[in-house]
Image (tube, rainbow, N blue to C red):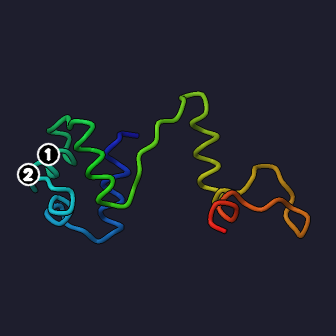
Amino acid sequence: MSLMEPLIAARKDAGLTQAELAERAGLSRMTVQKMESGALDPRVSTVLESARALGLEPMLVPAGLRQEVEAFLRSGGKYLAQPSGVSAPPSIVETLGG
């Protein structure tokens, strides 16, 4: 998976055009178009501005933990291999949000 794939998906999910994302991120529409098409290898600062304009915060994850982190995020932040029910520990989402 390329770094741009989740950004493109997030832009489309937000219902934004490339021009609207560009305006929010302080970039030109042409820069966003070239990044998304692969014609431009963007600077890290450009990717960060694009991500933040979409309400995302990029995070570096050690390669050896990638699968576990992705599974954890897909689970909604639930502790892995924990029973459900009254005596179950709260999810990390509940812990952080509440």
x and y, in percent, of residue 80 in the image: 76, 49
Residue 41 quadrant:
top left
Q: Secondary structure at mark 1?
A: helix
Foreground of the two, 17 or 86: 86
Label 1 neighbour load within 10 Å: few <14, some 14-19, many 20+: some
Q: Considering the image in quadrants, where does the N terminus appear?
A: top left
Image-quadrant location for residue 34:
top left
Question: Whole-percent x and y of residue 86?
Answer: 89, 70
Labelled pair 2, 1 in contact (Cβ < 8 Å): yes
Residue at screen point 32% across, 52% down: 51
- The x and y percentages for residue 9 are 35, 58
Residue at image location 75% in from the left, 52% down from the top: 79
The residues bearing labels 2 and 1 have C-alpha atoms spaced at a distance of 6 Å
Q: Report the disc number at residue 34.
A: 1
Label placed on residue 67: none
- Residue type (three-letter) at the residue carrying disc 2: Met
Q: Work out whether residue 60 or residue 96 is closer to the camera in this orientation and state it.
A: 96
The residue under label 2 is: 30
Q: State whether residue 39 is above or below residue 52.
A: above
Q: Residue at x 61, y 33 (%)?
A: 65
Which residue ends up furthest to the right in the rendered image?
87
Which SS class for mark 2? helix
Give the percent coordinates (x, y) of residue 46.
22, 44
Q: 3 left or right of 97?
A: left
